[in-house]
Structures are given as structure tokens and as C-alpha cells.
Amino acid sequence: MAKIINLVESYVSGAGTSLFASFLLEFLLSNQFEPFLVDLDKSNPDVLSRYQSSCDCVTGIGLNPTDNKRTSELGYLLSAVYDRDRQAVVNVPSIGLDRIQEFVDDNSFEEIRLRRWFVSSLEPRSWDIFEKIANSSEDKFQLIVVHNLRSGLEMTEEQQEFCEVRGIKVLKISWIQFPGRDLQVIEDKPNLPLTKLPLSEQGQRRLQVHMERIFIQIFSIVVGAAVEKK
């Protein structure tokens, strides 16, 4: 099986990394990829809470603003991927930029493919960080923009050209307009995966349609990368 690390990043609070990490896990689980989860957000491990009953999880490593350790813990990610011989989904907290960059710079990722899913609403600070990551790639990883439409911002011609020139794929997500009762269910049941939440019939239908749209986009990126790799 493929050894792949999927880093879900943003570095701007509230951008939607936990939401997209959940969608990515659901996609991999529904296609029998048997992913394992690493939630590096020590202060609010919401993705770990929601999926620890549904997939293998690596615990005991993470990042928070008071950590003195730099990248030594992150090195365990490589061992975990080699040992499990399958895909990892890594939810990265907004404070993790410097340590993730060091982790990427310090490792060659031989026999491991690195995907970086950068979740952004396209606000200036977020885009500046994305451009720095894109310009530092050195072909070590595949970079994908996950455009969160919630802010209402659309890509400018310059942003589109920046991605096209570098072969960067763009995936679009938005928050689902759940009925009020379903929003309360999601809040009250943080330990259940999205697909196992006891939503109303309308909420389940909206979730299913929304996830199908996102799955099609993820599939085209994942399969396209696999073909190019060959």
C-alpha cells in the first residue's frame, strides 16, 4: 500500500482545517484506504475526538504554543507511516507553521509521498503563507489549495495564475447549511464521525450531497497524482 502523509494545514484560526481533515478521513475510509489519524492540535484535538472510534489513531504527539520541543516528535510521523504502510491524515494546528516547515526541510521523505492540503479563505495573511510554502517546495511535496468559500472571496486572476504555473490543484469546500437542530446534534456529539451523527433526514441528505461533491474533487486530485507518479 502507498505510504502517504496528508498534512492538513492553514495557520489561520477558523479556516476549516478540522472540517476538511474530517472530509478527507471520510473519503479514505469510504474507499477502504484504512488511513490513520494524527491530530497535532493538543489544545483542541477535535478531529481525534470525532474519529478515534473509527480509525487507527497515533496519540502522544502534538504541538502547542508552550512546547520547547521542535521537530523531534514529528519525526515519529515517518516511523508511523513506515510501520503501518498506509496513509496518514495529519491535522495541523494554526500555531504549527515553523515546526512543520522544519520537519519538511529536515527530511527527504524517501519512499513516502507528502501531500499538503492548505485550507484557505484567501484572505491576505493566509495567501501570503501559502505563497511562501509554494515557493519553498523543492519538489518535495504535492501542494493543494483547499479554498473555503465561507468568506465569499473568490480567487483573483493573479492567484489563479500562481497556481496554474506551479501545477497546484484547487479544491473548493463550503460549510453545510444544516437545520438548527442538526447543528446542536453536531455540538452535542463531538465523539461521533460525521457519517454516524443522528441528523435529521434533511441534514443527512445535505451532508451526503456535500460530501459527494468534495469526494469527486479529492478523487481527481489523488488519482491524478498517482497517474503522474507512474
Image: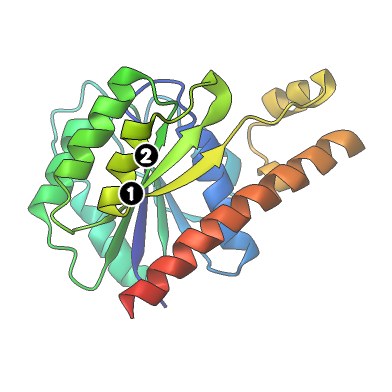
**The C terminus lies in quadrant:** bottom left
Residue linked to disc 2: 160
Q: Residue furthest bottom?
A: 230
The colour mode here is rainbow
Residue type at mark 1 is: Glu
Q: Is residue 51 above or below residue 178?
A: below
**The N terminus lies in quadrant:** bottom left
Residue 139: quarter of image? bottom left
Percent across and percent down for residue 59 are 39, 46
Decide if residue 141 is on the left or right side of residue 101. Answer: right
Q: Is residue 204 visible?
A: yes
Q: Residue at horizontal 32%, vertical 25%?
A: 126
Circle 2 — which element? Answer: helix
Decide if residue 197 is on the left or right side of residue 167. Answer: right
Residue linked to disc 1: 164
Task: Please tell me which residue lies in front, 95 or 190.
Answer: 95
Circle 1 — which element? Answer: helix
Q: Is residue 72 visible?
A: no
The CA distance from mark 1 to mark 2 is 6 Å
Percent across and percent down for residue 153 are 49, 22
Crowding near the residue tagged with mark 2, few <14, some 14–19, many ≥20 C-alpha atoms within 10 Å? some
Crowding near the residue tagged with mark 1, few <14, some 14–19, many ≥20 C-alpha atoms within 10 Å? few
Percent across and percent down for residue 55 are 55, 56
Q: Residue furthest left?
A: 106
Q: Residue at horizontal 24%, vertical 21%?
A: 65
Residue type at mark 2 is: Gln
Q: Residue at horizontal 53%, vertical 40%?
A: 172
Q: Residue at horizontal 44%, vertical 46%?
A: 170
